[in-house]
Image (tube, rainbow, N blue to C red):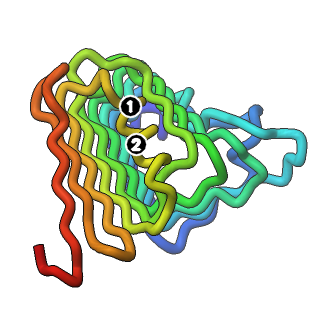
Amino acid sequence: MCRSLKTLKLWLPCRLDNLVSPKYSIGFQFLKNLILNEVWISDNDDKNSSHDLFSGCLNLENLELNKCFWASNLTTFYISAPKLLKLIICDLSYNDMLVISAPTLEYFEFSSFYPPIDLCIEKCPALEVKIYIESDRNYLQMMDITERLSHAISLMISWNYFMGKILLSRDTLGGEIKWVEFHEECGE
């Protein structure tokens, strides 16, 4: 049976309908590795504004979301998994807020054209964070994300924007944040 499944990889074209409803979650209790690549997830529940699709994956350790699209009225995208160690999100399409509750999370990587409008990560004692953004979005929004990740042991944010690139990094918890700005016209 699928209940004992430990690794699941879903690739394009794949569409999961009505899974975002609070009635459903991906419920493989022994699943340790989940990769969703170009998966379209939709629901028809107009009353639902938030849901944790992965709450039924109690042993999930590695989650990778690549170019997935959430076609719903979700305003908050939750990822909670008590044993999650590694989370990689690349070009995830969702609405407003990304909330990650994973007390054992050690590595988080986020890359997208747009930064999350609001990002909340539960304090993780051994968290390494890498964020890559390709956007002309608000500078203050990027600084807010940096502040929200102050509990991370290691932090690296790379932000490409119309004038060049900004690289923020911190190697140790409580260490000084290093800031480097590269301008396209100067070649610096």
Could you tell me which quadrant the C terminus lies in?
Answer: bottom left
Which residue does the image show at 25% across and 15% down from the upper left?
A: 125
Taking 165 as reference, is 83 left or right?
right
Left or right: where 13 falls relative to 149: right
Taking depth in this image into account, of 84 and 19 the one nearest to the observer is 84
x, y percentage for residue 28? 49, 33
- Element on which disc 1 rests: helix
Residue at (52%, 73%) from the top-left corner? 13
Residue type at numbered disc 1: Glu
Q: Position of residue 117 (x, y in %)?
A: 57, 47
Percent across and percent down for residue 126 are 21, 21
Labels 1 & 2 near each other (Cβ < 8 A): yes
Amino acid carrying label 2: it is Met
Picture quadrant where residue 158 is located: bottom left
In the image, taking residue 188 as reference, residue 74 lies left or right, namely right
Where residue 140 sits: x, y (%)? 47, 47
Number of numbered markers:
2
One can see residue 32 in this view: yes
Q: Is residue 57 visible to the viewer in this orientation of the structure?
A: no
Label 2 packing within 10 angstroms: few (<14), some (14-19), many (20+): few
Residue that carries the numbered disc 2 in the rendered image:
143
The circle on residue 62 is none
Above or below for 57 versus 135: above
Q: CA distance from mark 1 to mark 2?
A: 6 Å
Residue extending farthest to the right is 47
180 or 89: which is nearer to us? 180
Which residue is drawn at the image coordinates 17% and 21% (left, top)? 173
Mark 1 highlights which residue? 147
Find numbered disc 2 in the image and state the secondary structure of the residue it sits on.
Answer: helix
Mark 1 Cα-neighbour bin, 10 Å: few <14, some 14–19, many ≥20: few
Q: Residue drawn at (43%, 67%), measured in percent from left and top?
A: 135
